[in-house]
Image (spheres, rainbow, N blue to C red):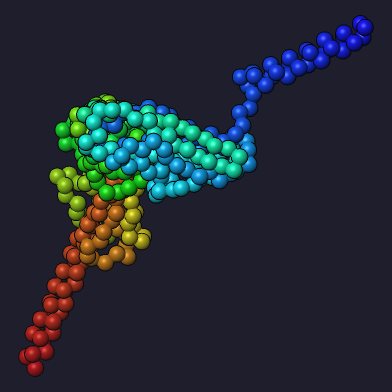
């Protein structure tokens, strides 16, 4: 008797535990389901509304489900769409879902009476029903939302500032959404689709859908470092929404190379050192550090700089270095080009210096004396032998 009672109690406990596990929140859901995020919507007479649906398969074998819409009022039109075209059946693979849309065209004379449309999905061993309540209103408010993925960007004036954001049409109808950007003076602003190049000022967005957009900001080259606010505004009908962005511009040096007063020419003698002042100007918005000077001279020439490295040039300031140029003793008289270069922090400034090479004045004097001596000899010879 006691043994039989114990066995009964044990069996009852096992059954209770199994039932508790089956009803626990963590139990795996299986089956095919037809669902929507919005089973009750409001539509304006004379308009079209699109309701997103999903045929979801949770852990069972795929099955063909034939689709119907019941309860469509007279004069109304209800169409089931899949992949942008009308469909009459759908099949969801195991552990996946098929997106569908219920498009409802409501006539202008529909009145104010609410209706319920029932979406049905019939399979071999299963029938699914999804009632969708549709209320009617003369005028529906438009609703938009905007979300920026990276609302704060940082860079130099030469950087690319591209803000990625998403516009969602949360209205019950398709909308033509206008876009505008309020940026500081002389800043350029252009809108394109996220992966497009065509500039846009407005874009159509279907009801319940969203668009990924890009705002490109082009600051002027002379902009000062600092934080700049940018406001993006999107609007459609009576709906307007804004997003506030930030642009942090950091300073950047910009070097130019020239001679004094912009002169880039000098004279030099063969095998004789000549000094030329190289003026480096930082017209950027940040100090230039560790500026190194170098150059490219004709073969056999000597080119040196003093100093060869300039430690610091503040923004808006300039500094000088003396370039010492020595033409080779094999150079001929004429014009030569010497390339000068200054590099700093990945930037460079270049200039071409024209050097006019002349021979030494000593050789000119010697040449003149030789010509004079030759003339005297010639005169003497004529005077002596001309009497005969």
Image quadrant occupied by the C terminus? bottom left
Residue name at image x 29 percent, y 64 percent? 331
| Image mark count | 0
Residue name at image x 12 percent, y 77 percent? 376
Q: Is residue 132 above or below residue 198?
A: above
Q: Is residue 96 left or right of residue 336?
A: right
Residue name at image x 16 percent, y 49 percent? 263
Residue 164 horizontal/vertical position (percent): 34, 36
Q: Is residue 14 left or right of residue 182?
A: right
Report the residue that reaches farthest toward the top.
2
Q: Is residue 19 left or right of residue 247?
A: right
Question: In this orientation, does residue 157 appear?
Answer: no
Image quadrant occupied by the N terminus? top right
Q: Relative to the observer, which residue lies in front, 158 or 9?
A: 9
- Residue 296 lies in what quarter of the image? bottom left
Report the residue that reaches farthest toward the bottom.
388
Residue 278 horizontal/vertical position (percent): 24, 44
Q: Relative to the observer, which residue lies in front, 346 or 226?
A: 226
């Amino acid at each position: 008797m006691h043994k039989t009672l114990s066995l009964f109690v044990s069996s009852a406990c096992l059954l209770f535990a199994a039932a508790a596990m089956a009803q626990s929140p963590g139990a795996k859901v299986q089956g095919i389901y037809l669902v929507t995020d919005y089973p009750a919507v409001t539509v304006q007479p004379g308009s079209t509304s699109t309701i997103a649906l999903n045929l979801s398969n949770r852990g069972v074998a795929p099955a063909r489900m034939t689709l119907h819409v019941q309860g469509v009022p007279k004069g109304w039109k209800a169409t089931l769409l899949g992949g942008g075209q009308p469909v009459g059946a759908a099949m969801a693979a195991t552990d996946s879902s098929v997106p569908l849309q219920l498009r409802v065209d409501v006539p202008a004379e529909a009145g104010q009476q609410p209706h319920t449309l029932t979406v049905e999905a019939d399979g071999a061993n299963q029938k699914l029903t999804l009632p969708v309540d549709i209320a009617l209103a003369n005028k529906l408010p438009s609703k938009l939302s905007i979300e920026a993925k990276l609302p704060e960007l940082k860079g130099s004036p030469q950087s690319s500032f591209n803000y990625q954001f998403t516009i969602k049409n949360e209205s019950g109808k398709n909308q033509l959404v206008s876009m505008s950007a309020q940026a500081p003076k002389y800043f350029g602003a252009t809108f394109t689709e996220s992966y497009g190049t065509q500039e846009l000022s407005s874009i159509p967005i279907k009801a319940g859908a969203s668009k990924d957009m890009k705002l490109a900001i082009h600051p002027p080259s002379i902009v000062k470092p600092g934080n700049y606010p940018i406001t993006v505004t999107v609007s459609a009908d009576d709906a307007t929404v804004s997003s506030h962005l930030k642009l942090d511009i950091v300073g950047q040096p910009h070097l130019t190379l020239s001679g004094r007063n912009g002169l880039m020419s000098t004279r030099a003698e063969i095998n004789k050192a000549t000094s030329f002042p190289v003026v480096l100007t930082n017209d950027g918005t940040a100090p230039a550090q560790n500026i190194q000077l170098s150059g490219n001279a004709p073969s056999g020439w000597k080119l040196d700089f003093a100093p060869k490295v300039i430690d610091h040039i503040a923004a808006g300031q300039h500094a000088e270095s003396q370039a010492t140029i020595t033409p080779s003793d094999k150079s001929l008289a004429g014009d030569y080009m010497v390339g000068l270069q200054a590099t700093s922090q990945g930037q460079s400034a270049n200039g071409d210096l024209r050097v006019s090479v002349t021979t030494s004045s000593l050789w000119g004097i010697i040449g003149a004396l030789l010509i004079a001596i030759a003339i005297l000899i010639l005169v003497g010879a004529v005077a002596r032998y001309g009497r005969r």
